[in-house]
Image: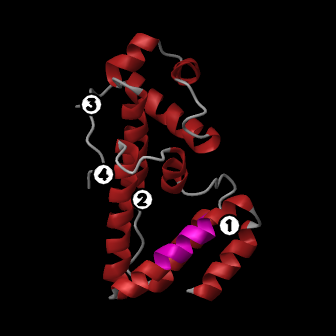
């Protein structure tokens, strides 16, 4: 599923390296605090190469979110409460866990009409649909997603094991 409208991508090793590098940096350092020069330097490409593949930083952010969405979609758990719960807990328990890439991105873009916020909204609507299909109810899906969001934030800001335990008890 496409969550963002992106310029037609030209497959290249440099583009892939830019996206991989930016994804690691955005996830660990944030989006707005990171400039194009930092990404270009870390990816060992020129500014011209960057702008050949991504007309703007926003385009790179959208590609980052699309790649994150694609990875989640590709490794989606079985449509059961147990599998969804285990998936959330597994994410929180990873040593490199820094919260949800989509929640973090939304926090950095205030305008709900900004393309980044629209991409986040599209991802969240897709995920809500996945959970709704698994649980059979809009209300149950909304509750699960809200508890997941809270567990992601708690797992990033505090004790991950406690967040996992509390999430499991709450669903």
Q: Is residue 80 above or below residue 40?
A: below
Residue highlighted by disc 3: 9
Q: Residue furthest front?
A: 111
Residue lying farthest to the left in this orientation? 8
Question: Which callout, 4 or 1, points at the residue further toward the start of the chain?
Answer: 4
Answer above or below: position of 86 versus 37.
below
Q: Position of residue 118 (x, y in %)?
A: 34, 51
Mark nearer the viewer, 1 or 2:
1
Seen in the image, is 103 located left or right of residue 70?
A: right
Image position of 161 (left or right of 111)? right
Residue placed under numbered mark 2 in the picture:
72
Residue 117 or 99: which is nearer the viewer? 117
Q: CA distance from mark 3 to mark 2?
A: 20 Å
- Residue 43 image point, x, y percent: 53, 23
**First of labels 1, 2 by sequence position:** 2
Which residues are drawn in magenta?
144-152
Q: For the point 53% across and 45% down, which residue is it?
A: 108
**Residue 146: in magenta span:** yes
**Magenta stretch: residue 154 in it?**
no
Q: Is residue 46 left or right of residue 91?
A: left
Whether pointer 3 and pointer 1 mark residues with C-beta atoms closer than 8 Å, the reply is: no
Give the number of the disc on residue 81: none
Task: Calculate the distance from the C-alpha at mark 1 to the C-alpha at mark 2.
Answer: 20 Å
Distance from Cα at disc 3 to Cα at disc 4: 15 Å
The dominant secondary structure in magenta is helix
Mark carried by residue 154:
1
Helix, strand or loop under label 1: helix
Callout 2: SS: helix
- Along the polypeptide, which appears first: circle 2 or circle 4? 4
């Amino acid at each position: 599923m496409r969550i963002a409208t992106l310029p037609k991508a030209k497959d290249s090793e440099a583009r892939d390296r830019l996206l991989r590098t930016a994804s690691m940096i955005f996830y660990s350092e944030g989006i707005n605090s990171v400039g194009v020069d930092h990404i270009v330097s870390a990816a060992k490409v020129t500014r011209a190469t960057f702008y050949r593949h991504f007309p703007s930083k926003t385009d790179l952010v959208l590609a980052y979110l699309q790649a994150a969405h694609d990875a989640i979609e590709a490794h989606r758990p079985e449509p059961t409460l147990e599998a969804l719960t285990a998936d959330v807990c597994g994410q929180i328990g990873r040593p490199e866990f820094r919260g949800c890439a989509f929640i973090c991105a939304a926090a950095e873009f205030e305008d709900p009409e900004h393309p980044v916020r629209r991409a986040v909204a599209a991802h969240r609507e897709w995920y809500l649909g996945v959970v709704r299909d698994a649980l059979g109810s809009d209300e149950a899906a909304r509750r699960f997603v809200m508890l997941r969001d809270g567990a992601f934030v708690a797992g990033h800001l505090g004790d991950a094991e406690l967040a996992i335990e509390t999430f499991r008890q709450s669903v």
